[in-house]
Image (spheres, coloured by chain):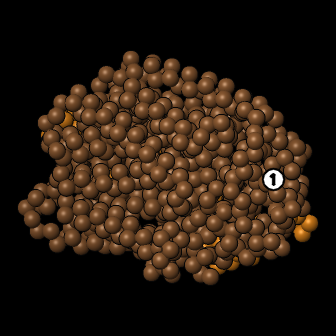
Chain colours: A orange, B brown
Amino acid sequence: MSNVTASRITNNPAYRELIKKRDTLAFTLSLGVLVLYYGFILMVAFTPEILTQPIASDSVIPLGILIGVGVIIGSILLTGIYVRRANNTFDPMIQAIMQDATK
Amino acid sequence: MKITNNSALALLASTVLLPLHSAIAQTAPGAPATTATPTPMPPPVPAEPPLNLHAIVMFIVFVAITLGITYWAAKRTKTATDFYAAGRGITGLQNGLAIAGDYMSAASFLGIAGLVYMNGFYGLIYSVGWLVGWPIILFLIAERLRNLGKYTYADVASFRLQQGPVRTMAAIGSLIVVIWYLIGQAVGAGQLLHTLVPQISYQVSIVIVGGLIIIYVTFGGMKATTWVQIIKAGLLLGGATLMAIGVLLHEGFNFEKLFSDAVAVHPKHLQIMQSVAPIGAKPNPIESISLGLTLMFGTAGLPHILMRFFTVTDAKAARKSVLYGTCFIGYFYCLTFIIGFGAIVLVANNPEYVADLAKSVLTLKGGGSMPAVYLSHALGGDFFLGFIAAVAFATILAVVSGLTLAGASALSHDLYANVIMKGKSTEAQEVWVSKLCVIALGILAIFLGIAFEKQNVAYIVALTFSVAACANFPILALSVFWRGLTTRGAVVGGYVGIFGSLILLIIGPTVWTKVMGMGPAIFPYDFPTFFVLPAVLVIAYVVSVTDKSRSGQAEREAFEAQEVRSETGLGAEAAFAH
């Protein structure tokens, strides 16, 4: 790797855009996971009655089971969103930047 | 009372690394028993058992297959990259299975099922925390780690910093995590194997495990370790799926029926659906938040997990592997929840499995890690029990192999090759030292496993995950994301993380009060992350910005080149096709 190529990359506005876009997505999704999980934990700590109420009057299943499984599925979905965006948006951007730098 | 409540949480936390023998037994006194008797846990009953032939045959088959893989891998392990990173030829799906396998330890399988068996709904709340670290690894760490590193996460933390001090700090953090994690696994292995095949003593069980992993890792390196892990992950997911299907079949695929049957059988009845804390303990907000932080960021700082990202072909495969891994782990936790409830219905109250029906319909022969094991017997007889027992054994072998390799690479790649020899050793020397370290760590694990047999090891999860969350993770993340980090900031911050969490753990309720018997704890929480992690970030920041040294300035300037490699993969270690 030569420094010339590296500096050509850093001078490319598309590179700055890539970092900005990817960081924005990564931190937004991280925040999403924190909100999901801490929303759940704070309910456990402060409003357990929401979690323990049955889903129907004749059911023993508490709402919390659905919410807990929801947090698991939500986390998986957020990772899915990231991978999809990275495959469809970021990888082509990186490819274009690299091509530009080795021209 | 507050202390007991906190401790109950930590003791339950230990279930993921350890079978519940000690954990549940010690939670019981903290929980005001609503049953008539205070149910002191009887010691595991050595109930004159017949030879568990199915299990033994399946152990032997598994060992034969894995030794075959090791032979295959050994012939293909020539370079250091082969040895540490499986030649970087692992695909996203394979690595997804392998990281899931590293995370789904035998104790996590048996432990969480046991937790659900005792506490019902709470087990789900608890297992959710173990999943949420994975998205964070994906968003912040995985691809950048693959682009920047070679064999260890210290490669990345020290990328533009001074090799000696930063690698030493990172290696100490790694080794503390790896060695304590190993102790937990070794003690669990001894107890489990001895319980399942009582003819094999605790000590012999540990020697078998230690001997096998030395063979796998010294000869087969990361290739053998990864493939053992992949096979085991497949077996574990398959076995757990079969058990869950068996339970649902029994309950006519009706969850309402499963849960109401469990409520009817369990001595705490509806409480198992309505308690958001371990039954008998009160939730404590700060402890819950601290536990959550520890699990979330600790996962992202476990050296044996991070090491897996160097085995894949490129950043894209690293990214995919986390998605696969998260799916497998999330699915697995849903299964353990069904298995735990299935065990309440099919195992509790059954004189074949319960130690003493007159005392408690829940307490099982062999202790708190047995619900899933007995459930397999209730569903599929001796054959299925043998299969699940062999899977649990395979799981321990695979996890211990990964840990040993991670510890050996911290010793050989970080300390020997880069700190002591300052990068002047040859690749062959480095691999040779690494193999010696594998043997040393394997023997150490055997000795520590035997030494800790009767010790109270309930603090191990808190210890390993706290050090990972307070030292390994923040320094890694700062080094990758923050231009301003200098060697001084990284080293001071890292040591504050390591020693801050260790000291607070020692003066906390589990170690100070329970293990050492020194009276009321000085620090009231079991998980120090809530306090230590912010302190590490602040200290690393302050020390870095006040660092006016020339080298500190050069390190800030080197960030740009690091960022190009980290973001685009330019100059990243190439994959080798084999």
Q: Tally the numbered discs.
A: 1
- The answer to whether residue B364 shows anywhere in this view is yes
Front-lying residue, B193 or B5: B193
Element class at badge 1: loop
Image vertical order of residue B302 relative to residue B387, above or below: below
The residue most toward the right is: A58
Quarter that holds the N terminus of chain B:
bottom right
Instruction: Give percent across and percent down for residue B216.
Output: 44, 29
Image vertical order of residue B231 relative to residue B136, above or below: above
Instruction: Give percent across and percent down for residue B5.
Output: 62, 76
Quarter that holds the C terminus of chain B:
top left
Q: Image point 21% across, 70% down: which residue? A: B543
Q: Image point 56% across, 59% down: which residue? A: B14
Quarter location, residue B230: top right
The residue most toward the left is: B550
Front-lying residue, B451 or B66: B451
Q: Image point 61% across, 37% down: which residue? A: B200
Instruction: Give percent across and percent down for residue B473.
Output: 38, 58
Q: Image point 23% across, 27% down: which residue? A: B428
Q: Is residue B372 left or right of residue B555?
A: right
Q: Is residue B512 left or right of residue B544?
A: right
Which subunit holds the residue at mark 1? B
Q: Is residue B267 left or right of residue B133?
A: right
Instruction: Give percent across and percent down for residue A89.
Output: 44, 44
- The answer to whether residue A53 shows anywhere in this view is no
Q: What's under tag 1, amino acid-wise? A: Val
Q: Which residue is mark 1?
A: B354
Report crowding for label 1: few under 14, some 14 to 19, many 20 or more residues within 10 A (C-alpha). many
Q: Is residue A74 left or right of residue B258?
A: left
